Amino acid sequence: MTAWRVEDHRGPAGAHVALPEPDGRTLRRLQVEGPALILGSSQPVEHVDEVAAARAGVEIARRRSGGGAVLVGPGLALWWDVFVPAGDPLSDPDVGRAFHWLGRSFADALQGLGLAASWHEGPMRHSRWSRQVCFAGVGPGEVLVDGRKVVGLSQRRTRAGALFQCSVMLEWEPSALLDVLALEPAERSQAAADLRDVATGIGPSREEDLRAAFLAALGTR
């Protein structure tokens, strides 16, 4: 069975998004000192209220994979990258199906913590807000607990392999994210109401347990 290399990186989000691609199966656990808004690769910067973000001390960075914005940081959400090289048995040429093994791994890990987790096997489910907010939609392989999204996934494919960028929600409070998006007051209020129950968190106290459970799940792939 192919071994996984595990790397831990701590620093600003801008340094994490600039890391080079690994050369084998790799799990990178990316830690930031404060809150950071991670935009999708093609997400317009106009989606962000940069003045509000600066006032709140929220760093802004752009990941290499697509989708909407995620707010990561201590007590908010985990940010992990998973890399699978081209030609690996886990590699799948179908972009949607390529997420499935990863979704199963996260679901297995969360089930091991006693959570009713399942992964989404169908196509992307969009909503009014999913272009701006990752957790407002549900894509292939993404993981839900009791019907509410907990794990968001995005993917970047190159000749070297597939980089899966993953966010695991610790505490879901949509207003913290919406406060740094460029929305009119009425839009922000509507988004807060619409997004209140679309996601949930596993709780900051379970972070270390999840790390161990996820590594164990990866070891079976």
Image (spheres, rainbow, N blue to C red):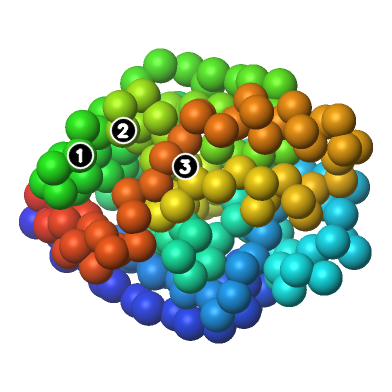
Q: Position of residue 145 (x, y in %)?
A: 31, 33
Query: Compared to 137, does 153 lie above or below?
Result: below
Relative to 133, 181 lies left or right: right
Q: Position of residue 78 (x, y in %)?
A: 43, 60
Q: Are marks 1 and 2 in contact (CB under 8 Å)?
A: yes
**Mark 3 against mark 2, which lies toward the viewer?**
2
Pointer 1: residues within 10 angstroms few (<14), some, or many (20+)?
A: some
Which residue type does callout 1 highlight? Leu
Relative depth, front residue between 140 and 94 = 140
Q: Are marks 3 and 2 in contact (CB under 8 Å)?
A: no
First reached walking from the N terminus: tag 1 or tag 2? 1
Pointer 2: residues within 10 angstroms few (<14), some, or many (20+)?
A: many
Count of marks overlaid on the render: 3
Q: Which residue in the protein does label 1 denote? A: 115
Which residue type does callout 3 highlight? Gly
Please indicate, yes or no, whether residue 100 appears anywhere in the rendered image. no
Q: Mark 3 falls on what kind of element?
A: strand
Pointer 3: residues within 10 angstroms few (<14), some, or many (20+)?
A: many
**Mark 1 against mark 3, which lies toward the viewer?**
1
Relative depth, front residue between 121 and 115 = 115
Residue at 76% across, 33% down: 189
Real-space Cα distance between discs 3 and 2?
12 Å
Q: Which residue in the protein does label 3 denote? A: 152
Q: Mark 2 falls on what kind of element?
A: strand
Q: Which residue in the protein does label 2 denote? A: 145
Real-space Cα distance between discs 1 and 3?
17 Å
Q: Position of residue 95 (x, y in %)?
A: 47, 31
Residue at 61% across, 68% down: 35
Please indicate, yes or no, whether residue 201 appears anywhere in the rendered image. yes
Q: Quadrant of residue 186?
A: top right
* Quarter of the N terminus within the rendering: bottom left
Real-space Cα distance between discs 1 and 2?
7 Å
